[in-house]
Image: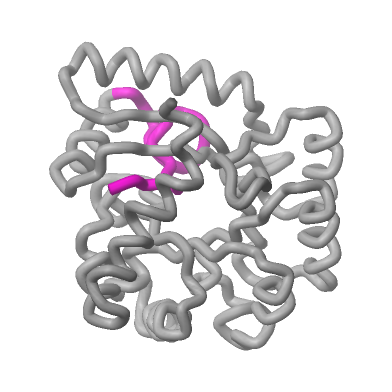
Amino acid sequence: MIDLHNHLLPGLDDGAPDLETTLQLARLAVQDGITHLICTPHIHPGRYDNTQAGIEAVRNEFSAALKQAGIPLQVAAAAEVRFGLELMDSLARGTLPFLGEWQGNKVLLLEFPHGEVPFAAERLTQWLLQRQVMPMIAHPERNKGFLRNPGKLKPFLQQGCLLQVTAGSVAGRFGPAAQALAHALLKQGLVNVLASDAHNLQHRPPLLSEGLAHAARLVGDAQAERLVRHTPWQITQSHFA
């Protein structure tokens, strides 16, 4: 399986604090059947001021440590980018880290503020699409704005934005409301990718199999497999060529 949203890179955000923890998380991911990871630390101006170069440097250290420890995991890096006008400047400067490509567009893992969907947010996503950048909306099922009103997803779906749902949400780890919305989106065929959004060993581990099993009961084995293998690989394979 391929996990294209997680916070395993050490010391960059609210995920793994150090390399030792990162390697523990990597072992857990491998045990769960994950073979490839795209590490996506937060880029959130004023809170997590990560840069493409800084992320890549830590990814190189992680990759070397995996090899030394004999952990069979392929890793690449992108970022979970916070919604904001700053990303327009980052795109102009060529410093936005992308997950990969989808139908000729670069894919950006885009995070909205947790408590709301910003007013007229679809204008920024449209601006990105006009520049051949495909937004993949991170964990919409856990955003309070979408939870209050799932209809707010409609303009983004009409634009063609991709949706990444957290595997743990599908399995009920984030409560009944997030699970209900995740299940509804799956049944409607609106989810493109399941990812772990792993942060730590205890509460948010790098696991996909549990969510995959729940998804398979809702949409069938073939469609569930697409969410953790085929579609993530189509998007991210350029990282591993």
Give the quarter of the image for residue 166.
bottom left
Q: Nearer the viewer, residue 231 or 96?
A: 231
The residue drawn where x is 70% and y is 35% is: 96
Residue 7 in the image, given as x and y percentages of width and height: 43, 41
Against 20, is 37 above or below? below
Q: Position of residue 24 (x, y in %)?
A: 21, 33
Q: Is residue 161 left or right of residue 58?
A: right
- If the image is split into quadrants, where does the C terminus sit? top left
**Measuring 47% from the left and 84% from the top, which residue is drawn there?**
188
Which residue is rendered at x = 32% and y = 65% of the image?
A: 168
Which residues are drawn in magenta? 1-19
Whether residue 224 is in magenta: the answer is no
User: In x, y percent, where is residue 123?
Assistant: 85, 65
Q: Look at the magenta stretch and give its main secondary structure.
A: loop
Q: Is residue 32 left or right of 92 when viewed as pictured?
A: left
Instruction: Give the colour scheme shown.
Output: one colour
**Picture coordinates of residue 122 (x, y %)?**
79, 68
